[in-house]
Structure formats: structure tokens, C-alpha cells
Amino acid sequence: MRIANGKAAVVREVDGGAKTLSQKLPAVVTADLRLNEPRYVTLPTITKAKKKLLETINPDDLRVADVSPRLKTESAADSGLSQFVSRQVMKLACPALASAAIIV
């Protein structure tokens, strides 16, 4: 995290690489202790979740006036994962073309 000019900039990992978010200060930034540990859901939990009703609430019901986004994406970087996945799919689909170049 970087703090400068009254803003906090945070780098967040996403599927395609890294995403930088900025927020005016004061701000609360949190991270989970088990940030990179996968969660394995059990079958009974999935069954319970399917039965549970979802309640939809409008911002007006909560007397919230401004619901516009307050975060701004500063930048996003590609980690090269998309090209790797494309190459693996090509190898599976057509082994004869496995050595061909992929232009994305």
C-alpha cells in the first residue's frame, strides 16, 4: 500500500494479473489472514445455500442517497496467464498445432 497526496493506493491480485485501486483518506483497508488458502465447500453446505431465500433491498429502503462507485481503478497489468491458457487449450484441441504461435 502506498499513501500519498491524501490517497491510499492498494495493489490487488486478480485472475489476469494485478489491479491498483485508490481511495481518498481516511479509509479502512482490510486483508484476510487466510488470503491465499482455497475454501472447500461441503455438500450439506451447498444444499443449505440452495434452500435459503435471498432478500433484495433497494438503497432507497435503507435511505442511502449516493450509491455511485467511490473507488477508481488506476491500472491493471496482465500477468501472461491468458496466453498460457490459450496455448494449453490449443494443445488439447489440436496437438499438431501445439508449436504454432498465439497472437492475442
Image (cartoon, rainbow, N blue to C red):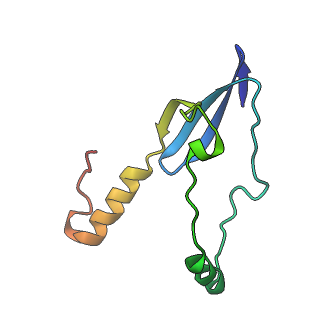
Give the answer, above or below, for where 5 lies relative to 55: above
Q: As drawn, is 103 to the left or to the right of 23?
A: left
Q: Nearer the viewer, residue 6 or 55?
A: 55
At x 49%, y 35%, the residue is 76
At x 71%, y 17%, the residue is 4
Where residue 30 sits in the image (x, y, percent)?
A: 76, 43
Q: As drawn, is 102 to the left or to the right of 69?
A: left
Residue 35 image-quadrant placement: bottom right
Q: Nearer the viewer, residue 2 or 28?
A: 28
Outermost residue, right side: 33
Q: Nearer the viewer, residue 57 or 92?
A: 57
Where residue 90 sits in the image (x, y, percent)?
A: 27, 63
Q: In what quadrant of the picture does the N terminus appear?
A: top right
Give the answer, above or below, for where 88 lies relative to 75: below
Q: In what quadrant of the picture does the C terminus appear?
A: top left
At x 25%, y 51%, the residue is 101
